[in-house]
Amino acid sequence: MQSWQMEPYQYGDRRMPHHCFPPKQLTIDQLHKLSGVIHYKVDLSDLAATKKRLSNIRQSKNKVASDVLTIDENVRDFEKLCESLYEPIEKKEDEVFFILDGSMYYDIEFAEEEWIRIYLERGDLIVIPKGKPFRCTVTSKNYAKIQRFANQGSR
Ligand SMILES: CSCCC(=O)C(=O)O
């Protein structure tokens, strides 16, 4: 996981990093203070630890279901899917995303028109607090496998 403040106006390919200038990397603490996002690194090769982390998260966030979304150039309507994922959205429940493979950028609007970009790869799990606008995109590798979690009746 890495996170940084994005440049004010993000023109061009959304799958580029879009650092502000000079670049402002954030520590996990800074990320949390600015956006409320919580991050865990999960060792996917340790099955017991992975299960435990997921079960803790499910319980504490009341997530009763999950699915796995694979995004790559072979999925039907890849471009359309990417467009829709990049539309800012804010949810009524805390959102949990777990990267099983590949990489993703999650962008959080922490102040009016000010965005933090979070780079996630295999084993990264984040909780995005309810009410925070966010959007996401694949990186230039065009590949991610993401486990998403849902509350009762939310999907
Ligand atoms: C690619 S996972 C994030 C997109 C989203 O908000 C969702 O599907 O719930």
Image: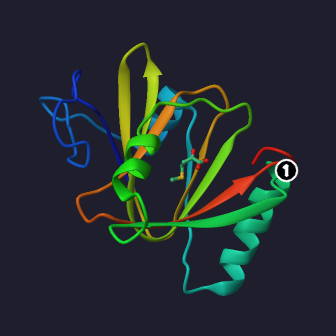
User: For the residue carrying disc 1, how many other residues have a C-alpha within 10 Å: few (<14), some (14-19), or many (20+)?
Assistant: some
Residue 146 placement, left or right of 87:
right
Image spot of residue 2 (x, y percent): 35, 51
**The N terminus sits in image quarter:** bottom left
Residue 150 placement, left or right of 119:
right
Which residue in the protein does label 1 denote?
A: 62
Q: In which quarter of the image is residue 108?
A: top left
Residue 126 placement, left or right of 55:
left
Q: Which residue lies furthest to the top in this view?
A: 112
Q: Quadrant of residue 26?
A: top left
Q: Residue furthest front?
A: 76
- Give the SS element for disc 1: loop
Identity, as a three-letter code, of the amino acid under mark 1: Asn
Image spot of residue 103 (x, y percent): 37, 63
Q: Which residue is drawn at 81% across and 48% down?
A: 151
What's the coloring here? rainbow
Q: Residue at x 54, y 77 (%)?
A: 43
Q: For ligand 1, tell me if the residue under mark 1 lies within 8 Å.
A: no
Q: Nearer the viewer, residue 52 or 19?
A: 19
Q: In this view, does 54 lie above or below 115?
A: below
Q: Residue at x 43, y 45 (%)?
A: 136
